[in-house]
Image (cartoon, rainbow, N blue to C red):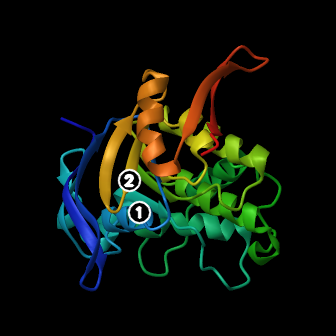
Amino acid sequence: MDFFTVEDLTAGYGKKEIIDHLSFSVDSGCLAGVLGANGSGKTTLLKAICGILPHTGSCILEGTTLEKLNPRQLSQRCSYIPQRSGISIDISVLDVVLMGFNPWLGLLERPTASMEQKGRKALALAGLEGKEQQNYQTLSEGQKQLCIFARALCCEGHLLLLDEPESALDFRFRYQMLERLRRWLSEDARAAIVTLHDPSLALNYCHRLLLLSEGKILGTLSPGTDSLPRMEELLEQIYGQISLARLPARSGREHLVMLREEA
C-alpha cells in the first residue's frame, strides 16, 4: 500500500475547475516537489488535499481517507504551511510554534512542558534558536516563514504540505530549509509535498517531482535517477528551451544546474 495516494482529485473556485482529475502517490520518506507555471494549480492542489477547498476524489494517508475525517482529526495527520501566515497580533515566536499543538489540546488547555520542549527543538532546527520570546511581528518575512516551518515540524502529523516555502528566504536559507526538511522526513514514517518556484532547488532536493500544467500532470521526474534528456523534455513544457547539466560541488556531491537557452 502506498503511504499517500491522491485519486481522481478535482477542485477549483466556484464553477471554475483549476485541477482536473489528478492521481498520484507518494512513498514514506519522500519529499515530493510540485513545479508549474503561475496558475497551473499548485496552490489549489495543496488546499484541496488539506481540506481547505471543496473537491471530488480521494486523498488516502496510511490507509485513512482524509475526506472522512473531521477538521480536528485531519489537522492531527496533516500540516499545511501557506505562503503567508496571516498572523497579525503581537505574540511570541514560541507561542506561534505551540499553536501547532492545538489539535491535541482541549478548550483552554495549555501546551505541556513536553510540547514546549518540542517547540524549542523545532525552532533550533529551523535556525531560530534564541528567538523564542521575541515578538513574532518583529521578525523578517523570511524568519516568519521559518517560524511557521518550525510549527509544522514540532507536531506529530505524517503529511506536510508547504506552499512555496522558499519565496521569502535568501539563497542560504532556501537550501538549509530543504536540507532540514529531508532530515525530518528520515526520522519517522512521513512525507512532504512542496510547491516551488525555483526549479534548481526542486531538482537538487526533491526525491520526486510532479509537473503541472493547466491543472493536469504533465509527467513525473526522479531527479536522482532520470536521464538529463528525459528531464529536459518534460521541463521544457513548462520553462521553454532549457539545458540541464550535472556539476560537482567542492564536496564532491553532484548538483543539477538548469540553464535557459536562447530562443
Q: Count of labels shown?
A: 2
Secondary structure under the numbered disc 2 in the rendered image: strand
Question: Which part of the image, by quadrant, shows the N terminus?
Answer: top left
In the picture of the structure, the residue carrying the numbered disc 2 is 212
Above or below residue 25? Residue 227 is: above
> Looking at the image, can residue 195 be seen?
yes
Whole-number angstrom distance, CA of label 2 to CA of label 1? 6 Å
Above or below residue 192? Residue 162 is: below
Mark 1 belongs to which amino acid? Ser
Q: Position of residue 226 (x, y in %)?
A: 42, 23
Labels 2 & 1 near each other (Cβ < 8 A): yes
Q: Residue at x 62, y 55 (%)?
A: 150
Q: Quadrant of residue 8?
A: bottom left
Q: Residue furthest top?
A: 252
Q: Earlier in the sequence, mark 2 or mark 1?
A: 1
Above or below residue 52? Residue 94 is: above
Q: Residue at x 74, y 21 (%)?
A: 249
Q: Quadrant of residue 138?
A: bottom right
Q: Position of residue 57 (x, y in %)?
A: 16, 62
Which of the two residues, 130 or 206, is positioned nearer the viewer here? 206
In the picture of the structure, the residue carrying the numbered disc 1 is 40
Secondary structure under the numbered disc 1 in the rendered image: loop
Q: Residue at x 44, y 21 (%)?
A: 227
Label 1 crowd (10 A; few <14 / some 14-19 / many >=20): many
Above or below residue 155? Residue 182 is: above
Q: Residue at x 30, y 75 (%)?
A: 12
Task: Say whether residue 59 is left or right of residue 143.
Answer: left
